[in-house]
Image (tube, helix red, strand yellow):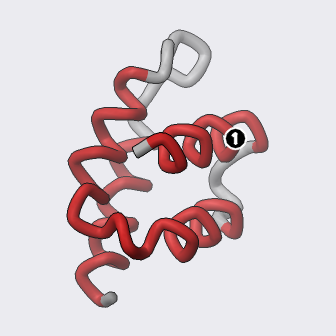
Amino acid sequence: MNDCMKAFDNAISDLCCINWSETDGSDVKNILKSSFTRYKNHKPEIIKKFEETSSLNKFQKSMITEILLKM
């Protein structure tokens, strides 16, 4: 799970570089896919961690959750 948390931290860092007002979600999907493909068994924990993150707004959390659930 330690590697998963490192992947989470890296994903948060990458997600902060996105222009959220211009995204169609494809860049978000690419980040999440590259970060969490090997951690599919931990989806509920990852989603919960994103929900608890204060640096993301409601729209961002919603988009991230939707993409993670479809992966």
Direction from residue 52 to residue 1 in the image, left or right: left
Residue 67 picture location, percent across and down: 50, 39
From the image, which quarter does the C terminus lie in? top left
Residue type, mark 1 in image: Ser
Residue 52 picture location, percent across and down: 69, 69
Residue 4 location, quadrant: bottom left
Residue located at (33% from left, 88% from top): 1
Residue located at (64% from left, 55% from top): 55
Direction from residue 60 to residue 19 in the image, left or right: left
Residue located at (24% from left, 81% from top): 3
**Of helix, strand and loop, which one carries label 1?**
helix
Q: Is residue 36 above or below residue 71?
A: below
Q: Is residue 46 above or below residue 4?
A: above
Q: Is residue 4 above or below residue 31?
A: below
Q: Residue furthest bottom?
A: 2
**Near-viewer residue (32 or 10):** 32
Mark 1, residue position: 62
